Image: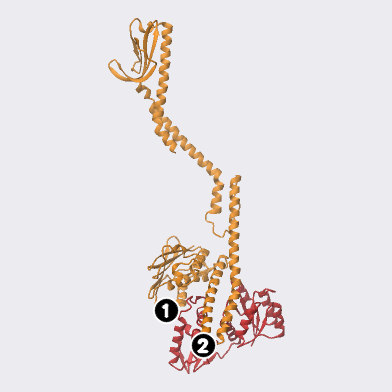
């Protein structure tokens, strides 16, 4: 899948590219003009658009870009967190809106959510070790037996699965689960408690070696 | 007023003094009359050959007496003396005068009964008092009317410019109608002053908002860089640990900037107040978010809220944030196995109160006044925190015209009361 990142902060564009490159093919544009040129040359699946570009108003650019590239999915990235901007952006055809500062795993999760939504993935079942995870039904199966997880536990598991083979910090996990309501207490063990529960519930059926604890850092699903 | 009271107290003495002076003059006049009669008609007109002469009016109110004076030499004297008239001893005001007539020296006495002198004192005093009171009432009334008329612009200035004005002073009030230059000057100065305050406030707000936005981009870059470093899955544990430490610090910075931005957005009127909020549903929703933290500290949560109450003209997200911040503190500063109670009541004065109390460590007396201030480090926030949660709560309440109050004591827990007007 091809992604175009239109962002005037070069350092930031580079970091997004570095993270997404493992799953996507990324192009960079630092100005609106440059971005529009790229769109003429290539077909993109995703366009990540910064609203605060030096040469054009971001929302205006979104309108033009959507004419050139109607199939692409658009995610607005902005430091301007105003509600009106968000509503306007979504109204003008953006698929999602991510206020800065955002975390890269979150960005990727949003992109995958859009993909799933857009292409209506009929087969939403993912294998995880000896388990099957149904992302739509939000359920976990061992063979044909359903294992009941709490909402939070399922959120955690699916988020880690989405970023499989990548370490996720407790902070990233708790920000995803609780959003703005994540605790300011960084050393809290809420995530650990949930992980422990997931392990306990699943290991009754089969090995959960794929769920790894990374010392100091957090957790990772390795498959 | 003091002068009036003094005057009333002195009044009897004054009246008496005046009466006596008047009487003394009267006695002198009488003396002159008698002497002029003597010079005209001779002393015998009175004495008629006898040595002494005495005469008094019917009720013994006045008398005249003449007798040989011998060699006694006395200047004219006026004194209050006792005289025996036909067996009655009476007190008189007496003028004594010694004069020489045809080589004989005579003493003339003219007297007036003191009781007679004082007889008009009482009515005089009364009249004086009435007049005085009348004058006082009259001047007070005149003063009132005058001040009402003359100072009316001042009242208008105070009531429109100063009393009940909500900061920031956005509503425009037309200039006061007055022809007095001083009031005009005062009004103009006040308007100018408020303009300046507004301008400074506007600048601060703009600065906070711009600064926060400008900070967001570098924070994002840093955060993303660290995330990429972590994602590289380096085997160097020490390095990983340091990066995680940096991420925590950055996270803290991010939260501060977020909080400042939120405050500045609220103050910028960026949140529409059009939502209906059910405290019961709101709390239920909130508890879902906080459940894991209650469990972690083994806190007991009691909720006693009426399900029917719905509050209007609020911003749901902000009210959510407000109650969240209060509950967050109730959890954060609670003791293990403590309690949190959320209850409500409707006050007859068209007021709905949400009461959040905890059994936590409480707030000291000298700190309680500062807990809503931005960045005021209160002792209990040493644990953790940025001193912004309650200042956000305060900003949200101010924005909605809600009252928030707190009562607390060290180790006794805290109680926050949020009072919503029911209009």
Chain given the colour red: A
Q: Residue at x 59, y 81 (%)?
A: B225
Q: Which residue is mark 2?
A: A220
Please determine whether, in this image, residue B51 is positioned above or below residue B8: above
Q: Is residue A41 left or right of residue B379?
A: right
Q: For the residue labelled by badge 2, is the local secondary structure a helix, a strand or a loop? A: strand
Nearest the viewer among B233 and B285 is B233
Where is residue B89 drawn, in percent x and y? Answer: 29, 19
Residue ranking furthest to the left: B87
Location of the N terminus of chain A by quadrant is: bottom right
Question: What kind of colouring is applied to the model shown?
Answer: by chain
Given this view, does label 1 or label 2 mark the residue nearer the observer? 2
Where is residue A111 drawn, in percent x and y? Answer: 59, 83
Task: Place residue A6 in its image quadrant.
Answer: bottom right
Q: Chain of mark 2?
A: A
Q: Residue at x 43, y 13 (%)?
A: B32
Residue B278 visible to an observer of this rendering: no
Q: CA distance from mark 1 to mark 2?
A: 24 Å
Q: Residue at x 34, y 4 (%)?
A: B49
Q: For the residue labelled by badge 1, is the local secondary structure a helix, a strand or a loop? A: helix
Give the number of marks: 2
Please determine whether, in this image, residue A47 is positioned above or below residue B347: below
Callouts 1 and 2 on one subunit: no
Colour for chain B in the figure: orange
Q: Which residue is mark 1?
A: B296
Where is residue B401 drawn, in percent x and y? Answer: 51, 62
Please determine whether, in this image, residue A118 is positioned above or below residue A51: below
Q: Residues within 10 Å of mark 1 (few under 14, many from 20)?
A: some
């Amino acid at each position: 899948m091809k992604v175009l990142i239109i962002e005037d902060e070069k350092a930031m564009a580079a970091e997004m590219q570095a993270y997404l490159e493992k799953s996507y093919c990324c192009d960079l544009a630092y100005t609106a003009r440059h971005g529009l040129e790229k769109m003429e040359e290539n077909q993109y699946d995703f366009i990540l658009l910064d609203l605060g570009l030096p040469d054009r108003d971001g929302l205006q650019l979104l309108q033009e870009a959507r004419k050139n590239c109607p199939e692409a999915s658009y995610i607005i990235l902005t430091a301007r967190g105003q509600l009106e901007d968000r509503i306007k952006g979504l109204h003008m055809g953006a698929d999602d809106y991510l206020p800065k500062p955002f975390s890269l795993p979150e960005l990727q999760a949003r992109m995958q959510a859009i993909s799933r939504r857009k292409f209506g993935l009929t087969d939403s079942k993912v294998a995880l070790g000896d388990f099957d995870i149904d992302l739509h039904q939000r359920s976990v199966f061992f063979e044909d037996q359903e294992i009941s997880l709490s909402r939070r536990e399922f959120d955690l598991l699916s988020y880690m699965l989405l970023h499989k083979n990548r370490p996720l910090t407790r902070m990233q996990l708790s920000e995803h689960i609780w959003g703005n309501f994540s605790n300011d207490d960084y050393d809290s063990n809420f995530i650990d408690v949930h992980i422990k529960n997931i392990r306990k519930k699943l290991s009754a059926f089969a090995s959960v070696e794929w769920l790894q604890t990374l010392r100091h850092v957090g957790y990772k699903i390795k498959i | 007023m003091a002068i009036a009271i003094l005057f009333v107290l002195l009044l009897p003495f004054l009246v008496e003094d005046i009466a006596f002076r008047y009487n003394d003059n009267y006695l002198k006049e009488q003396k002159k009359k008698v002497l002029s009669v003597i010079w005209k008609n001779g002393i015998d007109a009175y004495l008629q050959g006898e040595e002494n002469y005495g005469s008094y009016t019917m009720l013994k109110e006045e008398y005249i007496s003449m007798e040989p004076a011998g060699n006694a030499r006395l200047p004219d004297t006026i004194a209050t003396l006792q005289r025996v008239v036909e067996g009655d001893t009476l007190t008189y005001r007496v003028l004594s005068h010694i004069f020489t007539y045809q080589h004989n020296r005579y003493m003339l006495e003219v007297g007036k009964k003191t009781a007679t002198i004082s007889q008009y004192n009482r009515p005089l005093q009364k009249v004086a008092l009435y007049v005085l009171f009348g004058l006082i009432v009259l001047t007070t009334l005149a003063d009132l009317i005058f001040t009402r008329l003359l100072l009316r612009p001042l009242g208008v200035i105070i009531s429109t410019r100063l009393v009940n004005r909500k900061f920031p002073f956005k509503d425009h009030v037309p200039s006061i109608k007055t022809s007095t230059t001083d009031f005009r000057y005062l009004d103009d100065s006040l308007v100018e002053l408020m303009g300046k305050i507004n301008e400074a406030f506007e600048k601060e707000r703009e600065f906070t908002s711009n600064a926060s936005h400008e900070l967001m981009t570098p924070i994002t870059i840093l955060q993303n860089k660290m995330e990429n470093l972590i994602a590289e899955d380096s085997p160097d544990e020490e390095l990983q640990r340091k990066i995680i430490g940096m991420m925590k610090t950055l996270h803290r910075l991010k939260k501060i900037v977020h909080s400042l931005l939120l405050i500045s957005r609220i103050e910028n009127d960026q949140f529409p107040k059009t939502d209906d909020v059910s405290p019961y549903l709101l709390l239920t929703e909130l508890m879902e978010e906080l459940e894991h933290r209650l469990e972690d500290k083994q806190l007991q949560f009691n909720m006693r809220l009426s399900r029917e109450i719905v509050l209007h003209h609020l911003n749901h997200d902000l009210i959510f944030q407000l109650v969240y911040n209060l509950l967050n503190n109730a959890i954060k500063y609670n003791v293990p196995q403590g309690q949190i109670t959320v209850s409500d009541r409707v006050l007859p004065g068209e007021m709905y109160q949400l009461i959040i109390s905890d059994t936590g460590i409480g707030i000291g007396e000298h700190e309680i006044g500062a807990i809503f201030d931005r960045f005021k480090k209160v002792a209990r926030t040493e644990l953790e925190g940025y001193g912004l949660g309650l200042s956000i709560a305060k900003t949200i309440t101010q924005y909605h015209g809600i009252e928030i109050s707190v009562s607390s004591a060290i180790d006794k827990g805290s109680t926050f009361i949020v009072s919503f007007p029911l209009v």
